Amino acid sequence: MSRTRQAISSAPGDLERLLAFVTFNAAIGNTDAHAKNFSIVHYSNGRVALAPLYDVSTHAMATGGQQNMALRINGLASQPDLRLTDLVAEGVSWGLKPEAAEALVHCTLTELRDAVCAGEQERVDSSIPAYIDRQSANLLGGQRAGAGIGQPPALHHFTHS
């Protein structure tokens, strides 16, 4: 007897978590978030679930950083041109209700901004939290992610304490 398993279960939460992950990656400038950076966990009881995020970095800020995303969001490749409506439309295309997708994107961006403001910023280049906060604020305000940012400041070094 064979068992059929889906990569993303229909149980509440998997699609929402995936949209939160996509929103997070987009807001921080992780333009290298490709299909191999998303995994599933196979449990012994046959249940599958989306694995936690890994291999996450602000690639858009690297010296000569890539501004085109490895995966399209609502058909869009350019990360600085991404809007909140694109994130919501992507979630809707997976079967999420528009109101639920919008609420989830808003919540993810708001929590990201809160985390950046509360974080231990002295341990990282100060341009990282400022860049993430600005992009998140732009998206929440209905603007393009990169509005008013221009080319992201390149990271030349990291400070460690």
Image: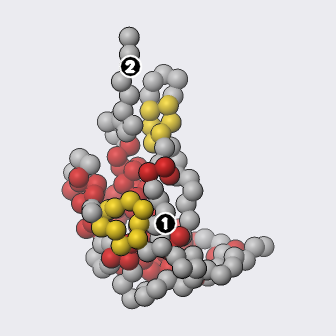
Using the numbered discs, state the Cα–Cα distance from disc 1 to disc 2 in whole angstroms. Answer: 35 Å
Locate residue 27: give its quadrant: bottom left
Residue at the image position 54 percent from the left and 70 percent from the top: 58
Q: In the image, 154: left or right of 25?
A: right
Residue at the image position 45 percent from the left and 56 percent from the top: 34
* Image quarter of the C terminus: bottom right
Tell me which colouring the rendered structure shows.
Answer: secondary structure
Q: In the image, 11: left or right of 27?
A: left
Locate residue 77: give its quadrant: bottom left
Identify residue for label 2.
3
- Residue 116, position as x, y percentages in the image: 54, 72
- Residue 28, position as x, y percentages in the image: 48, 69
Identify residue for label 1.
30
Locate residue 99: give its quadrant: bottom left
- Residue 136, position as x, y percentages in the image: 41, 73
The reply to whether residue 121 is visible in this rendering is yes
